[in-house]
Amino acid sequence: MARCKSLAPAPLRFRNCLPVALAALLSASALASATPTAAALGNCTFPLNYDYLDDVPVWRIRLVVRTADGENSGTDDPAYVQLNGTHDKFWLDYGGNDRERNSHQVYDVLDPDVVTAGDIAMIKIGKSGNDGWGISSVELWINADTQPIYRSSGSSVFLDSSSGYSNSVILSNLFHYADEWELRDEQCAIPEELGRESLESIIEASLGDSLHHDGSFGVSKSTYSYHADVYWKQLGEEAVTVTRRSDSTHDLDLDLGMKVTYDSFITSPGSDTTNLDVDLKLTWSCSDGSIEVTPNLQDVDFHVELSGLAGVVSDILGLFGFDVDDYLENVVESKLQSRLRNSFDGLNVDLGGYLHGCSVDDDGNLQLDWF
């Protein structure tokens, strides 16, 4: 359970010191249930000195989507959400098989342009591809409130690329609040603890979006080329695991999959699909009001066995001292290092001068020390 202290800075300062990039970190649960509850942050209160609902600071956003129970309602297509017109699509991609028929998912959403509730201009949900998706209901939750800020009403919608349908829907163009949502003091101002499960959830959300934008890479030379696609392994296992390494570091284990295709001037393309196990060390630094996390790649474990003629040529080149598999592994490791580092940039935030230290406890939770 997260522990929070009641610290009530002025409204403007609060908006500046809790950007939404930290949003999904500020909870103690991994969002295992369909409906978020205030218990996720413990019993924390602070005065809400705002005249309008639009001024309520937003430090966490969760989207609850229920897939309909009709035939062909489930989809394997990538899906996204947009909360305003200024930020890119945020792709909803967690490990495991989601958006199945008659199921629900809770997604953390990171949008740096949503600082207060009034910054939510719309709720647009869409997908790519031609595998239709039936949506029975959508809810949007902010912070640790006990009621959603938005709840869809009416019949289900069906997203599809075929004639007569659309691959996206704007559920609320002129954003309005759910009837039951109102100002209340059940918000948590500043956490004293960021739970281990919360760290896993935000990392999974951030990396899932990053994989969609930047999960493919390749090299093309005059004599050869290769291409790699990285994705969640989709085996129903925990895709992200965080454990304590030291007082200031976590070990992070990512269970991914990868398809590598190799081609050269003397072969037809050969490919292989492999499990990709990535181990990183996360180093936390908290001082002068800022919290920073630095990922360092520790180990990348995968093995590529190219198919077809490319595999034969790979074996022949190995006899002359050139190991194609080792070369691919070294290049992929280098590419992964830069992409993983980029995906953590949004977690380096300035909290406005209150924070002066942090440490990782025995259970893997990040303890924050405030002035």
Image (cartoon, grey):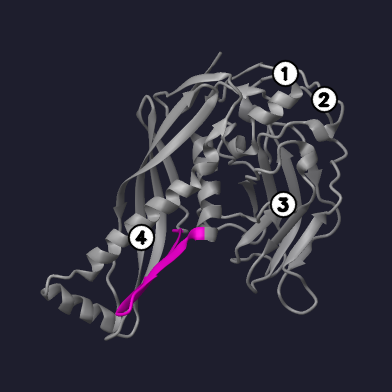
| The N terminus: image quadrant | top right
Q: Quadrant location of residue 88? A: bottom right
Check disc 3 and give the amino acid type: Thr
Task: Describe residue 262's horizontal placement relative to residue 206 as left or right.
Answer: left
Mark toward the viewer: 4 or 2: 2
> Which residue is labeled 2 in the image?
50
Which residue is drawn at the image coordinates 72% and 58% (left, top)?
Answer: 125
Check disc 1 and give the amino acid type: Phe
Comes first in the chain, label 1 or label 4: 1
3D distance between C-alphas at marks 1 and 2: 12 Å
Mark toward the viewer: 2 or 3: 3
> Which residue is labeled 1 in the image?
46
Mark 1: secondary structure: loop
Comes first in the chain, label 4 or label 2: 2
Q: Can residue 194 be seen?
A: no
3D distance between C-alphas at marks 4 and 3: 36 Å
> Which residue is labeled 4 in the image?
275
Q: Can residue 289 be seen?
A: yes
3D distance between C-alphas at marks 2 and 3: 25 Å
> Which residue is labeled 3 in the image?
86
Check disc 2 and give the amino acid type: Tyr
Instruction: Report x, y in % for residue 227.
Output: 39, 70
